[in-house]
Amino acid sequence: MAVIHHTELKPSKLELLTQWLPSRPWYRGGAGAPEPVKAGGFRLDDPAGEVGIEFMVVTDAAGGEPVSYLVPLSYRGAPLEGADAALVGTMEHGVLGRRWAYDACQDPVAVAQLVALVEGRVRAQDQNESDTPDRELVVGSTRTALAGLPTVADSAAGTVLTWADGRSLLVVRELAAGSVVSDGAAAYVEGAWRLGDGARARGLFVELRPADGA
């Protein structure tokens, strides 16, 4: 199990996201700079214990009306070769030293663990406590394995990971309270987060879609 270190980060994760979010096609934003506030999420464990994996939810009010986003991040102790375009930024960790933060949708270790989650082989962990399963996440898993590495594409609709057999995993970026899995989806992940007014919401985080025509 990953150990959660309650220590200082410079800059903080939210400060990194303030700079990174405007570069994303799925970020709605507004006239001013992003104002992300942590609103929920969960973690996944790297079996090798080297990469931190966090699916963070942030609520941003830069556009006037608060919008909640799912922001998967991976944290590494050294740069990920060939992944400069996926780099969110670097931080100084009070215990672990310099950490490189990446868009987890483009980190092969993080993607492998997300696949393991939707295949029912691993359980999500609490975002803030070590050795504690997340008790709010609901996973509908698939029995058909996803093999190999997917291609990754960002758009205003979210991030789509597509495998060679045509199946695709949608990572919802702009979350919607009450959203549900699509008809025909092979697997899904639903979670909870806090809205801008502090109320709790639930909705779809991830869904596995069959190949076109399947």
Image (tube, rainbow, N blue to C red):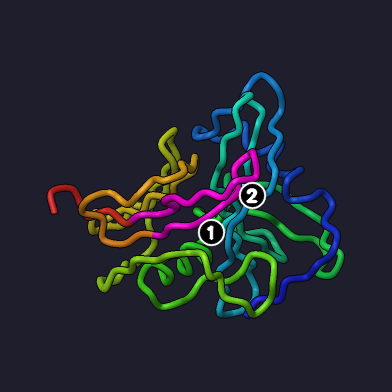
Q: Is residue 205 magenta?
A: yes
Q: Quadrant of residue 156?
A: top left
Checking the image for residue 87, the label placed there is none
- Looking at this view, name the residue that lies furthest to the top: 31
* Position of the N terminus by quadrant: bottom right
Residue lying at 63% horizontally and 24% vertically, measured from the top left: 64
Residue 50: percent from the left, percent from the top? 65, 74
Residue matched to label 2:
39
- Pick whichever, 118 or 155, lies toward us: 118
Q: How many marks?
A: 2
Task: Select label 2 or label 1 by which is in front.
Answer: 2
209 over 15 or under it: above or below: below
Helix, strand or loop at label 2? It is strand
Left or right, 210 with reference to 155: left
Q: Tell me which amino acid carries mark 2.
A: Ala
Location of residue 158 in the rendering, given as x and y in whole percent from the top left corner: 44, 41
* Contact between labelled residues 1 and 2, with CB atoms less than 8 Å apart: no
Q: Which residue is drawn at the image coordinates 48% and 69% (left, top)?
A: 113
| Amino acid on which disc 1 is placed | Asp
* Left or right: 71 in relation to 186: right
Which residue has dot 1 on it?
Answer: 107
The span shown in magenta is 189-207
Q: Is residue 147 visible?
A: no
